[in-house]
Amino acid sequence: MAKKNQIGIAACGAGLGLVLIVSFAFAQTATPLSVSCSGVASSSMITWTASTAGGTAPYQYAWSGAVAGTSSMVSATYSATGTFQAALQVGDAATSTATSTCLATVTSLPVTSTSTPTSTPGTPPPPPASTSTTGVTHVNPGLRPRLEIGPLGRVNLRGTLVTVASTTFTVKSWGGVWTVITNASTSFRRAHERRANLSDFLPGDFLAINGQATTTALTIDARMIKNFSLRLTPVLERERERKEKIKKIMERFDDRIEKRIEEREKQINKIEKRFETKLKKELEDRSKKIEKELKKIQSRDD
């Protein structure tokens, strides 16, 4: 009998242990979805790899920036040296999302049998056809590189953005890869002469740089950098056009109001002059009459 009790207690203990384990399993929460990415360059090719943890499988991948694709590992070949940035967004079956960015550098290109002049710029990677959170898209404007240097060192350069940092750019154009130095007074613009955000600049964008050449070879102190590849999304473009129309209407309205005010001021000035002339004449006549009356009074007294 004691043996049965011991077995019963053991079974009960085992049963309680099972209940505790099950309860603990249900109390646990899923690990949040996280993702990181890396790029490994081999000659002119970069292999981009995603590392995903947590969340609920299966995962969906979306690459943008310097590469495009929908798998955990993608590759792209680049025709220019420099540092490239890729952006990755991952979603899981529970509709969670995670993002990451990574950099990789192409330091050398494969040697080909055909040679090109050293002053001819290489073919840059095409600008990514993606939309940023700021409402701009990146397009290929179809423009050609240009280099103009004045006698005083004033430089007008057009070329393809290779790398971008907080204070320096590298741009592929005639003569090779130029280093562009920016400062607090440098203005950043996009098409239509509108202000641009530096965070929207991506490798492959086509830029125009206006600045001053330095004593260092292929280096420019930039006054203005214009990104021809940046375009507004259709919705924001229509909004921009609407604002432009309103601005023109208001300018015409302001011109009309200003013209009317000028005409009214002229009319008031004329009325004031006529009134002053009339008042002056009346005062002169009145003073003459007073003088005559005074003379009459004096003659009577005499």
Image (tube, rainbow, N blue to C red):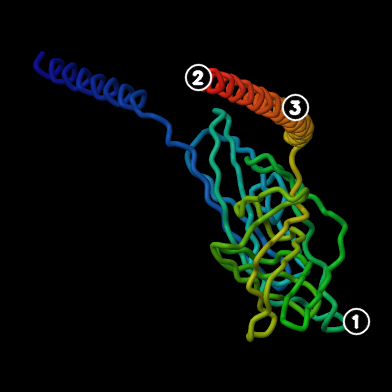
Name the residue at 74% across, 33% down.
Answer: 262
Residue 301: image tag: 2
Task: Specify the quadrant that holds the N terminus.
Answer: top left
Name the residue at 62% across, 25% down.
Answer: 283
Residue with the mark numbered 1: 114
Labels in figure, total = 3
In which quadrant of the rendered view does residue 115 lie? bottom right
Question: Sequence order check: which comes first, mark 2 or mark 3?
Answer: 3
* Identity, as a three-letter code, of the amino acid under mark 1: Thr
Mark 1 and mark 3: Cα distance apart in space:
80 Å
Local SS, label 2:
helix
Please tell me whether mark 1 or mark 3 is closer to you in this view.
3
Q: 196 above or below 233? A: below
Name the residue at 69% across, 80% down.
Answer: 218
* Identity, as a three-letter code, of the amino acid under mark 3: Gln
Question: Where's residue 10, x and y in %?
Answer: 19, 22
Q: Residues within 10 Å of mark 2 (few under 14, many from 20)?
A: few
Local SS, label 1:
loop
Q: 115 above or below 205? A: below
Name the residue at 47% across, 39% down.
Answer: 54
Question: Where's residue 137, x and y in %?
Answer: 74, 45
Question: Sequence order check: which comes first, mark 2 or mark 1?
Answer: 1
* Identity, as a three-letter code, of the amino acid under mark 2: Asp
Residue with the mark numbered 3: 267
Question: Where's residue 163, x and y in %?
Answer: 65, 66
Q: 96 above or below 50? A: above
